[in-house]
Image (tube, rainbow, N blue to C red):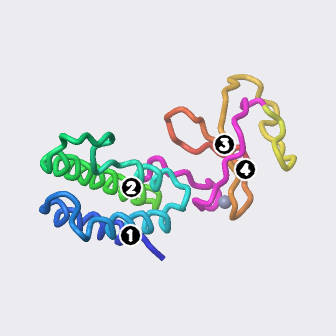
Amino acid sequence: MADKREVQRQIDRISDLKSKRAYPDEFEPWRAQTERVLAQVFGETSLQVTQFRGIHYGPVIVSTSDTDAVFDNHYHRGLSEAKMLLASFIEDLDESKGGSEKNVLTCPQCKAVEVDYLELRPSGATEIQGGLHLFGGRKKNIKTLAYYRCRICNNVFSIEPVKSGENESVK
Ligand SMILES: [Zn+2]
């Protein structure tokens, strides 16, 4: 199973690739392998794979007047972009593994991160999928909340989708 370290290894290989002129033999294997690692870590159809595939290592339109220097230039720029992108993916991984408390959505009951988004609903709602009753008599301060269900303990909870970030249990 691929993980963060393998993404890091692909980043580490970039400086070597960058020290060469456009398209050394090891470039294409590196690119293919990086794509495989990202697909394993984030999923075949993930944004990360799509973004990595979208990097250009050459001119989008090739002109006959392009010199080797033009290709070198694009190649090096593409590698820089790849390096930044991969580094940001690693940050994403750090965050979702509970590194920083912020932006990690956890079940307020059992602290699991395996939560499924249900829907946006006004806080006055009295029931939600599964028939759970919420907010007995509170009718004031109705605001829109994002509802989630924990896959581990089945708890349904809501958060305010706008900043604050604090989980508010509605159990
Ligand atoms: Zn839970």
> Which residue is more in the foreground, 84 or 54?
54
Is mark 4 in CB contact (under 8 Å) with mark 1? no
Give the residue drawn at x 44%, y 73%: 2
| Residue 60 counted in the magenta span | no
Extreme-bottom residue of the structure: 1
Where does residue 48 sit, x and y in percent of width and height?
45, 53
- Name the disc covering residue 33, or none: 1
Label 4 and label 1: CA atoms lie apart by 40 Å
Is mark 2 in CB contact (under 8 Å) with mark 4? no
Where does residue 130 sit, x and y in percent of width and height?
85, 50
Q: Secondary structure at mark 4?
A: strand
Q: Secondary structure at mark 3?
A: strand
Is mark 4 in CB contact (under 8 Å) with mark 3? yes
Is mark 3 in CB contact (under 8 Å) with mark 1? no
Residue that mark 3 sits on: 158
Badge 4 crowding class, 10 Å Cα cut-off, few under 14, some 14 to 19, many 20 or more, is many
Residue that mark 4 sits on: 156
Given the image, on which type of amino acid does mark 3 rest? Ser
Residue that mark 2 sits on: 89
- Write down the region rendered in magenta: 100-124
Label 3 and label 1: CA atoms lie apart by 40 Å
Q: Earlier in the sequence, mark 4 or mark 1?
A: 1
Please identify, in this view, whether the residue under mark 2 or under mark 4 is nearer the observer: 2
